[in-house]
Amino acid sequence: MRILLLGAGESGICFVERIREQNKDIEISIVDKNRYYYNKKDLLSLNLNNYFDLKDFAEKKNIKYIQGTVERINPKTKKVKLKDNNHIDFDILIIATGLISKKEDIKGVNKEGFFYLSDIEPFTLKDYLKISKEISIYTCSFLGLRLALSLSKINKEVNLIFKDLNFLEDYKDRFIEFLNSNNIKIYTNSYIEEIIGEGNIKAVKILPLKIFSSQLVFFDSGFLQNIDFFDEPVKKKDIFFTEYNDIYLLGDANRTELDYFYAYNQIEAKRQALVLADFILGGSNPIFSFKKLDYQDKIKVIEDFLNRKE
């Protein structure tokens, strides 16, 4: 049996560890576009020295690691095509490619220094942070707020741009006061229209019309499942299962709903991975449900942020 894992995040790593722990002989391959894995919490808190070396991990576990980007999956021939035109065969395919930011029609997004949240490359970001003082963030969720606070803590001049913070409900005014107290400039009811610069970013133009200096721009536009690798959209039949036999979804690629308070839950990711791994190894039908944040959970997220406990 040949197991191919696409995406080596928290759930994917836990999945192959479980498989290898129970069976030393199964052929396992991992494809990921990055050599190193950072969890989302470390990335948003700018803890950029805490990472996981996928190549070293794979060598220790007798797993084949391939650094590459998936272009297309053919479920009939059971082949994955990479962007370098190499093909990989599989018997069982686990898609754990996570989430991808929604792309927006903004002039200048191809300039150096612009990052959608799902496209942040930590080693590149390290270099930019050394030379950047003024940073702009457009946000529509809690993730952009977390990043803004992390940047302000390392003495960056942060411009925070958003249409509204209505998802914070009664906490909206308190939040704005808190962000202002951390020297974060706030632009409400606004949107980024253009990224200005020749090659590298020099400034940002927002609507209502205002232009200010910036060397880095982060765009929190919300997320979609990163599973667009088929000729037609893949249909999810049930938790983990797709319309194709032996092709499964794992981790954030499995999510169908995200809200403003989306946060990566490492415990949930590992639990999901163990359930699917045990099923693949011959166990009973997997039973799993995502934890949904209720009102009290969301209040705790807000209070922890305002009291700097997260």
Image (cartoon, helix red, strand yellow):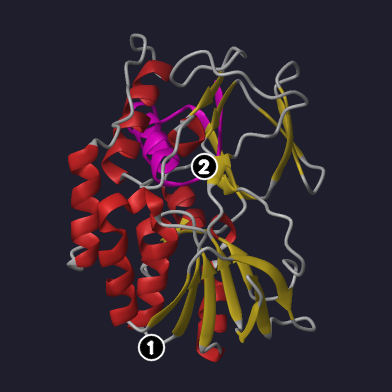
Give the labeled residue for mark 1. Answer: 155
Residue 144 in the image, given as x and y percentages of width and height: 44, 62
Residue 48 forms part of the magenta stretch: no
Quadrant the N terminus occupies: top right
Is 55 situated above or below 184? above
Query: Which residue is disc 2 drawn over?
Result: 98
Q: Is residue 263 visible?
A: no
Identify the magenta region.
1-27
Horizontal and vertical percent position of residue 121: 57, 66
Q: Check the image and report above or below for 158 versus 38.
A: below
Q: Say whether residue 21 is magenta.
A: yes
Observer-nearest of 290 and 274:
290
Going 56% across and 68% down the picture, which residue do you hit? Answer: 218
**Which quadrant holds the C terminus?**
bottom left
Kind of element beneath mark 1? loop
Give the label, 1 or 2, closer to the camera.
1
**Closer to the camera in the image, 41 or 13:** 41
* Place of residue 175 in the rendered image (x, y in percent of width and height, measured from the top left): 29, 65
Left or right: residue 90 compared with residue 134: right
Q: Quadrant of residue 286?
A: top left
Q: Which comes sooner in the sequence, label 1 or label 2?
A: 2
